[in-house]
Amino acid sequence: MAKFVTIGYGDQEGYDRTGAAVRQEAHAHDARLREAGAVMGIAGSPVQVRNHDDAGMTVESGSFMSSALPVAGFAIIEAATLEEAVRLVSKTPCAVAHGVVEVWPLQESP
């Protein structure tokens, strides 16, 4: 099975305007993904780490990327194909509650 990194984006406003039954089923779907081995977490506050030319580390608070919606969480899932991974995340809270989920194929390091 291939591994995929997913990044969920969404805000409280979009979540709140989604019907309670839809939200409950999305959370149940996440629970089934976790039971199947997905590693999931809610995004905390990020830091940026640099160590250019191994000459000294700097750490800054805040994200490097920016988007219209805040990052809500991350997951590592397994699926046979990208299409299957997309299908799996299409039922998660960020996807159904007016957010978006990115799916990144995770390739092995050489």
Image (tube, helix red, strand yellow):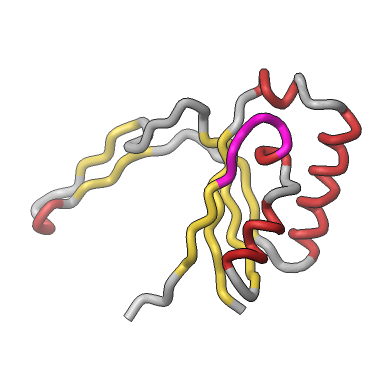
Give the residue displayed 90% in from the left and 33% down from the top.
Answer: 21
Q: Quarter of the image for the C terminus: give it.
A: bottom left
Give the residue displayed 42% in from the left and 76% down from the top.
Answer: 108
Task: Find residue 96 and report its horizontal and vertical position in percent.
Answer: 73, 37
**Where is residue 33, by image quadrant?**
bottom right
Relative horizontal placement of residue 8, taking residue 84 as reference (left or right): left
Give the residue displayed 56% in from the left and 36% down from the top.
Answer: 9
Query: Observer-nearest residue: 54 or 77?
Result: 77
Relative horizontal placement of residue 84, taking residue 61 as reference (left or right): right
Q: Quarter of the image for the N terminus: give it.
A: bottom right
Magenta-drawn segment: 96-101
Task: Find residue 91 and report its horizontal and vertical position in percent.
Answer: 75, 48
**Where is residue 79, by image quadrant?**
bottom right
Give the residue displayed 61% in from the left and 41% down from the top.
Answer: 42
Query: Observer-nearest residue: 50 or 108?
Result: 108
Relative horizontal placement of residue 110, taking residue 8 as reference (left or right): left
